[in-house]
Image (cartoon, rainbow, N blue to C red):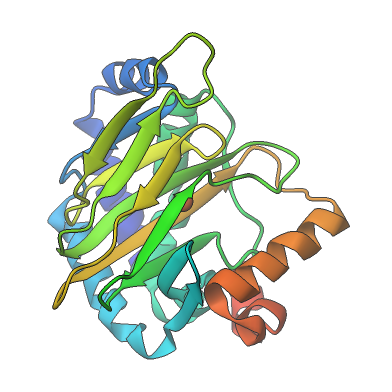
Amino acid sequence: MSETTVAVADTVKRALEAVDVSALRRAYWEQNEFVALERWLPAALVEPMVAEVDRVRPAINRNYIPRHKKGGSVSFYTLVERAPTIVAFYRSPAWIAFLSTLTGQPLQPCPPGDPHACALYFYTEPGDHIGFHFDTSYYRGARYTVLVGLVERSSSRLVCQLYKNVPGRTPEERALTTHPGTVILFNGDKLWHSITPLGEDEERVSLTLEYVTDPSMTPVKRFVSNMKDAIAYFGFRRVFLPSRSATRATQ
Ligand SMILES: [Fe+2]
């Protein structure tokens, strides 16, 4: 186990000792499987993760899908090679146990062949945004998203519609600023969300961590998921030709 992995696991464990887990769990369920924790991660984790954001900038893949999204992404494969703190956080056993308690599900990281498992999203040019969507699960089980703010010098907002499609409930909208260290956890099939367009001379970078209850996927859904990731996020080379080090490091 690397020094970074041990240090990150230790920091996460200590940070979680101060948390009122049952209050958070209640808030998560009262809000239809959504909870936002503002400026919550300790600087000991945020600072090295922001340094890793800068290290992976040369690997940004930009995409533009008219009327849906515009922005840059860096896949899990690149993070495995160049962002040890982020990947150690993603896999930290205490963190996964905490998320499993909040969601009431035995969560696990996505399989190593999923470029979305843990990825960075860069909003760096005016108008960068993503339209409303669910983080739909292509897996056999449910998929949960953890969104972490890392760089926030923007007027963009994460707009969340809670209780969408819940019979008898009027949806509630929240517009959140994802400051460095802010953590948002939600069930991907339940939270309707978007990022509003970036202004001039602004920048926003967020990290997302995806966890699943069942890491298996039918071959057809795997193909659809890969095509979506290649076109909308990481590019064909990164999705269909992942480096050997990514595969090796995650076995
Ligand atoms: Fe999303």
Image quadrant holding the C terminus, namely: bottom right
Is residue 114 visible to us here?
yes
Q: Nearer the viewer, residue 123 or 74?
A: 123
Residue 45 in picture, x, y percent from top left? 23, 59
193 sits to left or right of 104? left
> Image point 27% across, 77% down: which residue?
124
In the image, residue 229 sits, relative to residue 143, either above or below, namely below
Q: How many marks?
A: 0
In the image, residue 221 sits, relative to residue 127, either above or below, namely above
Quadrant in which residue 59 is drawn: bottom left
152 sits to left or right of 241? left
Q: Nearer the viewer, residue 52 or 95?
A: 52
- Residue most extreme to the top: 168
Residue 27 in picture, x, y percent from top left? 31, 19
> Image point 27% across, 17% down: which residue?
23
Is residue 1 visible to us here?
no
193 sits to left or right of 139? left
- Residue most extreme to the front: 67
Residue 74 in picture, x, y percent from top left? 45, 75
205 sits to left or right of 138? left
> Image point 46% across, 38% down: which residue?
192
- Residue most extreme to the bottom: 58
Residue 32 in picture, x, y percent from top left? 44, 22
